[in-house]
């Protein structure tokens, strides 16, 4: 009996030790300047704030911000495989397409690139959140509506979670935007995070 109890204690200790040593899961954010803290302190950006929030969760999560200002869907598509291989994320957040839209690039190409990224992430056994973006009204209703449709169609076809508009409740409030009218100021970043948090939270369970 004594030997049995000793073995049980050792076994339980090993289990607890394994649980304590378990690495934190990773959220990979692949985006452009909207996620790269453009013209504001990095620690004020919504991705950094997300990292602070997730670090307090049990079990812990880490956030890798692979966002680059000026990133297009094509360059993001080209970079993603190496990022998946390096970080093995459990969740991938894709925030791309704004620069495609601002440059008036073909929406069919954007659709292909987003679909390829979502598929690559899912093949790597990661859950995916797609963050949509809106363009200024001067781009015309046809192109703007087409951009919305791209995000919705890709999310539906590839079974990815979707936030239709990253800057919902922020973009149309000039006091929350930088002078360029495209990027939120530092004090608006918690609102952006709140937008992301709603569809992201179920993917963390």
Image (tube, helix red, strand yellow):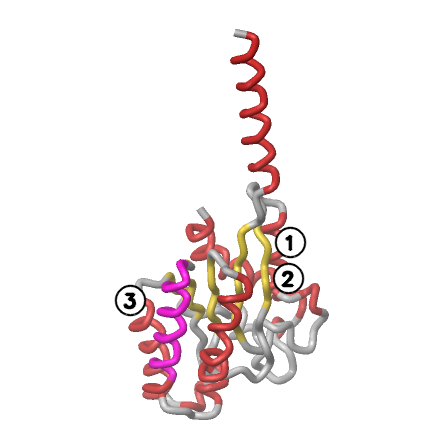
Quick one: which residue is furthest to the top in this view? 1
**Number of marks present in the image shown:** 3
At x 61%, y 71%, the residue is 176
The answer to which image quadrant residue 170 occupies is bottom right
At x 69%, y 68%, the residue is 42
Disc 1 element: helix
Task: State the residue in front, 140 or 127.
Answer: 127
Q: Position of residue 34 (x, y in %)?
A: 57, 74
Q: Residues within 10 Å of mark 1 (few under 14, many from 20)?
A: some
Q: Position of residue 44 (x, y in %)?
A: 68, 65
At x 61%, y 41%, the residue is 21
Q: Earlier in the sequence, mark 1 or mark 3?
A: 1
Which residues make up the magenta segment?
110-125
Q: Does the CB distance between marks 1 and 3 fall below 8 Å?
A: no
C-alpha span from label 2 to label 3: 28 Å
Q: Earlier in the sequence, mark 2 or mark 3?
A: 2
Q: Is 187 displayed left or right of 146 in the figure?
A: right
Q: Which residue is mark 3?
A: 156
Q: Residues within 10 Å of mark 3 (few under 14, many from 20)?
A: few
The answer to which image quadrant residue 108 occupies is bottom left
- Whether 73 is drawn above or below 175: the answer is below
SS assignment for the magenta stretch, majority: helix
Q: Residues within 10 Å of mark 2 (few under 14, many from 20)?
A: many
Disc 2 element: helix
Q: Does the CB distance between marks 2 and 1 fall below 8 Å?
A: yes
Task: State the residue in front, 31 or 39.
Answer: 31
Q: Position of residue 26 (x, y in %)?
A: 54, 56
The answer to which image quadrant residue 153 occupies is bottom left
Report the disc number at residue 52: 1
Q: Which residue is mark 2?
A: 48
């Amino acid at each position: 009996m004594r030997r049995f109890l000793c073995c049980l204690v050792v076994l339980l200790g090993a289990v607890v030790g394994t649980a304590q040593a378990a690495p934190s899961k990773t959220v990979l954010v692949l985006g452009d300047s909207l996620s790269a803290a453009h013209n504001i302190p990095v620690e004020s950006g919504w991705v950094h704030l997300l990292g602070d929030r997730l670090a307090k969760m049990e079990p812990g999560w880490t956030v890798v911000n692979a966002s680059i200002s000026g990133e297009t869907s094509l360059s993001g598509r080209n970079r993603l495989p190496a990022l998946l291989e390096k970080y093995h994320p459990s969740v991938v957040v894709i925030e791309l397409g704004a620069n495609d839209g601002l440059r008036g690039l073909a929406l069919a190409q954007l659709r292909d690139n987003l679909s390829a990224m979502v598929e690559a992430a899912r093949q790597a056994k990661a859950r995916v959140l797609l963050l949509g973006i809106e363009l200024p009204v001067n781009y015309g209703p046809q192109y703007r509506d087409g951009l919305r449709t791209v995000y919705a169609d890709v999310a539906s076809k590839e079974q990815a979670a979707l936030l239709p508009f990253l800057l919902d409740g922020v973009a149309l409030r000039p006091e929350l935007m930088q002078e360029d009218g495209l990027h939120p100021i530092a004090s608006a970043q918690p609102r952006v995070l709140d937008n992301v948090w709603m569809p992201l939270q179920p993917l963390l369970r």
